[in-house]
Amino acid sequence: MPPFLVSLQQTLPSDAFPWVVAALMHDALIWEALHGDLGQTALETFSNTPAAWQPAALAKLAAATAQPPAEGLPLPPTSLADAAVLAQALLQHRQESGHWQDLPAFLTAEGSDLAAWHTALACALAETDDAKGLLKALGDAPQGIPAALHALLCQPLPPEIHAVRAAEFLHDLPPEKQAEALWHLHGSRPDIAPLTAAHLPQSHAAPPYAAWQRAARHLAAGQFTDAHQALSQAWEETRRLTGQIAASQARLATHSGDIATALAAWEQAAAALPERPDITARHVLALYRARRVEEARSALPEQPQQPALLVTAAALWQTRHPETALH
């Protein structure tokens, strides 16, 4: 065991040591700094108080003995001291704007990947008076879910408290992002994931989101068979929904006289819903109207049985044998 870790274990209460270490290890810059000169300074400063080992306090300690950056923001950060500078920039932006709503725009304006801000966001979360607003802004941002969970999981909290805070964050997310967050949480902190899932209310999302969310919760709880079954259900519901949406788009395009769009949509609908003979018939007719007669004939079953396909087959037969048409 590294010397710092031995000293930390001897310093912290035995029940707090596992969850404090888990929080410290969650961020590479923090963990690296603690195995250098910062480790001993932190041990002397924070002693046996678990809550004191939070990212912002550690970053300030690192910055106190570091050379300030020459100009601009140190992106991407290469040290915990750099992250301290970025955290102050975030908090200053929050103070000037009065809210966190435009945080995604601020982060992307700096021209760096969101992952470069992870440590700084963890520090800012510990210091802001609007932690909920910060997490919501990240939840709304593209690729913001990992950043929000990283900031949360870097805080030195018992697993039960982490689960409550994570559930509060997940509760207001749309169904697809809530499922993404649970999958991410299972991958990064499988000890917290089932506790978080237990704190979430039952989903009232529409298919296929309900089954997808249920799969994520089963996975978080380690119920892999149930997760597989729920994902299979979500997949099947998605297939049917895709086909129904494509068919609706095809009908609208047909009504508007947009033959090319109608054909593409009927093709997608037929591929998604092969069990629907009426959809197959519409696809065949769309091919015929687009003057792709041979493709239309190939798309028909060899021996159609359903009424819709029989009518369509008869129409195509008459194009090949016009003498059979009724006058």
Image (cartoon, grey):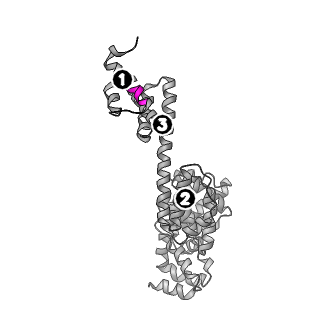
- Answer with mark 1 or mark 2, whichever residue precedes in sequence: 2
Quadrant the N terminus occupies: bottom left
Residue type, numbered disc 2: Arg
Please tell me in which quadrant of the rendered image residue 325 appears.
top left
Magenta part of the chain: 308-316
Please tell me in which quadrant of the rendered image residue 283 appears.
top left
Residue 243 pos. (x, y %): 47, 40
Residue type, numbered disc 1: Leu
Q: Is residue 34 visible?
A: yes
| Residue 292 falls inside the magenta stretch | no
Q: Secondary structure at mark 2?
A: helix
Residue type, numbered disc 3: Ala
Magenta span main SS = helix
Query: How many C-alpha atoms fall within 10 Å of the one at disc 2: few (<14), some, or many (≥20)?
Result: many
Give me the residue at 53% from left, 86% from top.
9
Residue 97 pos. (x, y %): 66, 53
**Residue on which disc 2 sits:** 214
Q: Nearer the viewer, mark 1 or mark 2?
A: 1
Numbered badge on residue 316: 1
**Residue on which disc 3 sits:** 246
282 is higher (above) or lower (below) than 94? above
* Callouts 2 and 3 close, C-beta under 8 Å: no
Q: Secondary structure at mark 3?
A: helix
- Answer with mark 2 or mark 3, whichever residue precedes in sequence: 2
256 is higher (above) or lower (below) than 151? above
Query: How many C-alpha atoms fall within 10 Å of the one at disc 1: few (<14), some, or many (≥20)?
Result: many
Quick one: which residue is furthest to the front in this view? 305
313 is higher (above) or lower (below) than 130? above
